[in-house]
Image (cartoon, helix red, strand yellow):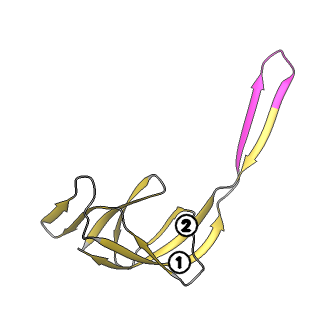
């Protein structure tokens, strides 16, 4: 069984036991998180698609880690003007393991 969930403005296809990194969610390491925005649930040839979400479906996940991604360098320059600007950014993330999918 698999599901398509939406969190942090992105969509993820998940199955039980999968590990995914999503935008930062509130929750301590080891706690349980419920992803309520389930767009579709399928198993084999059967696929239930919501309009836009399935009300009865939910996905339960456990928080493995809270962390920060690799640094991304943002460099801006205007030629012949002597203007340069260098910035770095590290995006926060939450690592989840999918425990159960309820259709």
Q: Assess whether residue 54 is covered by the magenta stretch.
A: no
Q: Residue at the spot x=74%, y=31% of the render? A: 76
The residue that mark 1 highlights is 63
Q: Do the residues labelled 1 and 2 touch (CB within 8 Å)?
A: yes
Task: Choose between 15 and 23: the one closer to the eye.
Answer: 23
Q: From the viewer's perspective, is residue 45 above or below residue 85?
A: below
Q: Residue at the spot x=57%, y=75% of the render? A: 27
Counting residues from the N terminus, which is met first, the one under dot 1 or under dot 2? 2
Q: Residue most toward the top?
A: 80
What is the secondary structure assignment of the residue under circle 1? strand
> Disc 1 versus disc 2: distance between alpha carbons?
9 Å
Q: Residue most toward the left?
A: 45
What is the secondary structure assignment of the residue under circle 2? loop
**Which SS does the magenta portion mostly show?**
strand
Query: Of the numbered discs in the image, which one, if any, rests on residue 25?
Result: 2
In the visual, does 101 lie left or right of 99? left
Asked which quadrant contains residue 48, the reply is bottom left
Question: Marks 1 and 2: which is nearer the front?
Answer: 2
Q: Residue at the spot x=82%, y=29% of the render? A: 84
Task: Choose between 91 and 49: the one closer to the eye.
Answer: 49
Residue 63 location (% of width, % of height) = 53, 77
In the visual, does 9 lie left or right of 53? right
Residue 16 location (% of width, % of height) = 34, 78
Asked which quadrant contains residue 59, the reply is bottom left
Q: Residue at the spot x=16%, y=63% of the render? A: 47
Q: What stretch is highlighted in magenta?
A: 72-84
Task: Choose between 73 and 22: the one closer to the eye.
Answer: 22
Quadrant where the N terminus lies?
Answer: bottom left
Q: Residue most toward the front?
A: 55
């Amino acid at each position: 069984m698999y599901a398509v969930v939406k969190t942090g403005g992105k969509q993820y296809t998940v199955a039980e036991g999968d590990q995914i990194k999503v935008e930062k969610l509130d929750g301590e390491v080891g706690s349980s998180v419920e992803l309520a925005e389930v767009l579709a649930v399928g198993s084999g040839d059967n696929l239930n698609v919501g309009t836009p979400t399935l009300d009865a479906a939910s996905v339960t996940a456990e928080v493995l880690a809270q962390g920060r991604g690799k640094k991304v360098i943002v460099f801006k320059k205007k030629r012949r003007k002597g203007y340069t600007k260098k910035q770095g950014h590290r995006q926060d993330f939450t690592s989840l393991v999918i425990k159960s999918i309820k259709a």
